[in-house]
C-alpha cells in the first residue's frame, strides 16, 4: 500500500494557485507600465508601422505579350534598298519576357558553300605555309605577303574583318512597343491588366504612355525607353545595349489603389566607352535557293536593344484572420 502511494504520488494530488496581492506603489506602477508597453507595441508597431491588420501577398502571377510596330528603310551599296518591318527587326518574332530589336547591322551577302580563305579574325586560321593547315592542307597567301589564312570548306566568302560602317535603322527611334501585362494575386483572386478598359478601338492606336495623362496606355517608343534609361539613341544604335523594363504593381485593396509603375535601367551603363563587354550583338542568317537549286545565305551581324521585362508586385488588404495571428 505504501509502495503504491509513493508510486502514484503525483496522480492523487490536487493543485491550486495562491495569489498574493501586494499594496506596493512602485511594484504596481511597474506592472501597469509593462501592460502599457505591450499595448503601445501592438498599436504603434503592429498596426501603424507594419500594418499588421492587412494581409500582404507578393505571390504574383503574370503574363506578358509584346508587339512592335514601325518601318525603316536601309539602302546599302551591296544589297540595295531593303525595307525592315517588325517581322525582320524583332527577334524572336513573338516577344515574351525578353525581346530584341535590331537597330543596326553588318551583312555578308550571297554566301555559298565552297572553298575559300578563312577569315583573318580566326586566330588559328593564320598560316605561313601549307604545313600549318589541317583542314584542306592549303595555305592561301596573297601575293607579296609572307603569310595568309588556311583554306576552309564553308560558307564563302567569310565575313569581312573590318566593315567601313554599319547600316543603321534610322527610324528605329520611332518604333513603338506595346507591352501587354496581365497580373493576378491568387490569394485574393484579384486580377488586373495595364491597359485602359475602354471600347474605343482606336485608343491604343493614338495614345502614348504618360504617367499622369495616360497611365493605362502601355505604348512606348524605343527612343523614349532609351531616354528614360539614361542614354540616347545615337549612343546605343551602333553598339547595342541591354535594358531592364520593370513593371511594378503596388496594390492596396483597402484604398482601392493598384497601378502599374514602369522603370527603365540600362544594364551595361557602368562600363567605360571602350570596354569590350559593352553593347549587344549576335549573328543570324537568311537562306535562299535559286531556280537551279543552289543554296545561298545572307549573314547578318545585328546590333540592337535587348529588353528584359520584369514584373514585380505586392498587394495588401484588410484581413482579420491574419491580424489575429499576431497575438
Ligand atoms: C539607293 O541608293 C542608290 C545610290 O546610293 C540610289 O541610286 C537609289 O535611288 C537608292 N534607292 C532608294 C530606294 O532610295
Ligand atoms: C603576316 O604578314 C604581315 C606582313 O605581310 C605581318 O604584318 C603580320 O604580322 C603577319 N602575321 C602573322 C600572324 O605572322
Ligand atoms: C520620329 O518622330 C518624330 C516626331 O514624329 C520626328 O520629328 C522625327 O523626325 C522622327 N525620327 C525619325 C528618325 O524618323
Ligand atoms: C562615353 O561617351 C559619351 C559621348 O560619346 C560621353 O558623354 C560619356 O561621358 C562617355 N562615358 C565614359 C564612361 O567614358
Image (cartoon, grey):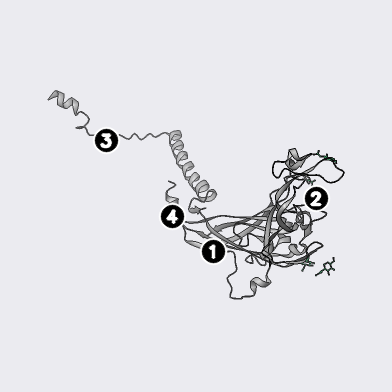
Which tag is nearer the camera, tag 4 or tag 3? Answer: 4
Relative to 29, 98 lies left or right: right
Quarter of the image holding residue 84? bottom right
Crowd band around label 3 with a 10 angstrom C-alpha radius: few (<14), some (14–19), many (20+): few
Q: Earlier in the sequence, mark 2 or mark 3?
A: 3
Crowd band around label 2 with a 10 angstrom C-alpha radius: few (<14), some (14–19), many (20+): few
Residue 162, numbered circle:
2
Q: Earlier in the sequence, mark 4 or mark 3?
A: 3
Q: Is residue 105 visible?
A: no
- Separation of disc 4 and disc 1 at Cα? 24 Å
Q: Nearer the viewer, residue 122 or 20?
A: 122
- Separation of disc 2 and disc 4 at Cα? 68 Å
Q: Where is residue 273 shown, x and y percent of the image?
A: 78, 46
Q: Residue furthest left?
A: 1
Q: Earlier in the sequence, mark 2 or mark 4?
A: 2
Mark 2 and ligand 2: say if the CB distance to the nearest ligand atom is below 8 Å: no
Q: Nearer the viewer, residue 21 or 138?
A: 138
Query: On the image, numbered disc 4 is attached to which residue?
Result: 320
Q: Earlier in the sequence, mark 1 or mark 2?
A: 2
Residue 292, compared with residue 106, is above or below; it is: below
Which tag is nearer the camera, tag 1 or tag 2? Answer: 2
Crowd band around label 1 with a 10 angstrom C-alpha radius: few (<14), some (14–19), many (20+): some
Is mark 4 in CB contact (under 8 Å) with mark 1? Answer: no
Q: Quadrant of the N terminus?
A: top left
Query: On the image, numbered disc 3 is attached to which residue?
Result: 16
Q: Earlier in the sequence, mark 1 or mark 3?
A: 3
Amino acid at each position: 500500500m505504501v509502495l503504491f502511494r509513493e508510486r502514484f504520488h503525483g496522480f492523487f494530488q490536487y493543485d491550486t494557485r495562491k495569489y498574493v496581492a501586494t499594496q506596493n506603489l512602485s511594484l504596481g506602477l511597474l506592472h501597469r507600465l509593462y501592460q502599457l508597453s505591450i499595448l503601445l507595441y501592438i498599436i504603434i508597431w503592429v498596426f501603424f508601422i507594419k500594418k499588421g491588420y492587412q494581409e500582404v501577398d507578393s505571390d504574383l502571377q503574370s503574363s506578358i505579350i509584346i508587339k512592335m510596330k514601325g518601318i525603316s528603310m536601309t539602302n546599302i551599296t551591296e544589297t540595295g534598298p531593303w525595307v525592315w518591318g517588325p517581322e525582320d527587326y524583332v527577334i524572336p518574332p513573338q516577344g515574351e519576357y525578353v525581346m530584341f530589336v535590331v537597330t543596326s547591322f553588318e551583312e555578308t551577302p550571297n554566301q555559298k558553300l565552297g572553298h575559300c580563305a578563312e577569315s583573318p579574325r580566326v586566330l588559328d586560321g593564320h598560316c605561313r605555309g601549307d604545313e600549318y593547315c589541317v583542314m584542306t592542307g592549303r595555305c592561301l597567301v596573297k601575293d607579296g605577303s609572307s603569310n595568309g589564312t588556311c583554306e576552309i570548306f564553308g560558307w564563302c566568302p567569310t565575313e569581312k574583318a573590318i566593315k567601313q560602317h554599319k547600316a543603321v535603322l534610322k527610324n528605329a527611334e520611332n518604333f513603338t512597343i506595346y507591352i501587354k501585362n496581365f497580373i493576378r494575386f491568387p490569394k485574393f483572386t484579384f486580377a488586373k491588366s495595364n491597359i485602359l478598359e475602354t471600347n474605343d478601338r482606336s485608343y491604343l492606336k493614338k495614345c502614348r504612355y504618360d504617367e499622369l495623362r495616360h497611365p493605362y496606355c502601355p505604348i512606348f517608343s524605343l527612343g523614349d525607353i532609351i531616354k528614360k534609361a539614361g542614354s540616347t539613341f545615337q549612343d546605343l544604335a551602333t553598339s547595342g545595349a541591354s535594358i531592364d523594363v520593370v513593371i511594378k504593381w503596388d496594390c492596396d485593396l483597402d484604398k482601392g489603389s493598384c497601378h502599374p509603375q514602369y522603370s527603365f535601367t540600362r544594364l551595361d551603363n557602368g562600363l567605360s566607352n571602350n570596354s569590350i563587354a559593352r553593347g549587344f550583338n549576335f549573328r543570324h542568317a537568311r537562306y535562299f535557293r535559286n531556280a537551279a537549286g543552289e543554296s545561298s545565305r545572307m549573314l547578318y551581324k545585328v546590333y540592337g536593344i535587348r529588353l528584359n521585362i520584369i514584373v514585380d508586385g505586392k498587394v495588401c488588404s484588410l484581413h482579420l484572420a491574419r491580424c489575429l495571428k499576431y497575438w
